[in-house]
Image (spheres, coloured by chain):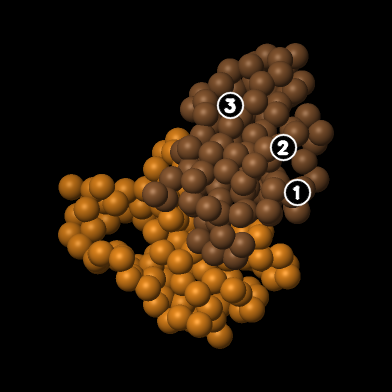
Chain colours: A orange, B brown
Amino acid sequence: KQEVTQIPAALSVPEGENLVLNCSFTDSAIYNLQWFRQDPGKGLTSLLLIQSSQREQTSGRLNASLDKSSGRSTLYIAASQPGDSATYLCAVPDTGANSKLTFGKGITLSVRP
Amino acid sequence: DTEVTQTPKHLVMGMTNKKSLKCEQHMGHRAMYWYKQKAKKPPELMFVYSYEKLSINESVPSRFSPECPNSSLLNLHLHALQPEDSALYLCASSQEIGELFFGEGSRLTVL
């Protein structure tokens, strides 16, 4: 059974700092990995999707990497801003059930002005 | 247009009421999902429809009844809910195996 871990649960950084959010998963036979952002009381916004054949994906100040063999993904946020404050979740499809995503518990990021 | 629209945004209902949540997408996605999310927890999958047929039911109580009238619409019919069913209900869609797009959610309160 796939398990996804995100540590730490919360992170507070000053504005302008570059930061890395970590995600680990137990079964490396994944089809893809997706990073989401969630603001309080809102839905999830897809940030980046990395296919299993890819090593990284970039969108603006965000860069996500994937190392299937070690069961790890990182989300790099450059020059963080207060508007980046949110909960960031990673998710991978379950082995043998690609329609079902297993989510990490998320990292709540606070960027201080 | 990468948008999934959910209505209503907020719903308050008594335990004897019948109500419905609605979801619509126009991205041509053939898979649609209902998730339930409690505060400070990740979303939990409830149902998956693939090509308008129910493909996954995560042992959800029968007081939740999904319906997929066509490839763009997904409903969740609610009847005789319990206070512990209060949560954020999220709809999502995707191509068969691809990027998942979520709506803003319907915040449900059961009194």
- What kind of element bears circle 3? strand
Q: Tell me which label, 3 or 1, sits earlier in the chain.
A: 1
- Residue type pointed to by label 3: Leu
- Residue tagged by mark 1? B54
Is label 2 on the same chain as label 1?
A: yes
Residue type highlighted by circle 1: Leu
Q: Quadrant of residue B84?
A: top right
Say which residue appears at 27% left-offset and 56% top-offset: A13
In the rendered structure, are the residues bearing label 2 and label 1 in contact, judged by CB atoms less than 8 Å apart? yes
Furthest residue in direction bottom, as rendered: A69
Q: Position of residue A38 (x, y in %)?
A: 43, 47
Q: Is residue A64 visible?
A: yes
Q: Residue B78 has which mark?
A: none
Identify the residue at image location x=78%, y=29%: B63
Q: Who's the residue at 65% across and 26% down the image?
A: B20
Residue A58, percent from left and from top: 32, 71
N-terminal label among 2 and 3? 2
Mark 2 sits on what residue?
A: B66
Q: Decide if residue B13 is on the left or right side of residue B3.
A: right
- What residue does disc 3 label? B108
Q: Compared with residue A39, is residue A14 higher up or lower down, i.e. above or below?
A: below
Amino acid type of disc 2?
Pro
Crowd around label 3: few <14 · some 14–19 · many ≥20 (10 Å):
some
Inter-mark Cα distance, 2 to 3:
16 Å
Compared to B75, does B1 lie above or below? below
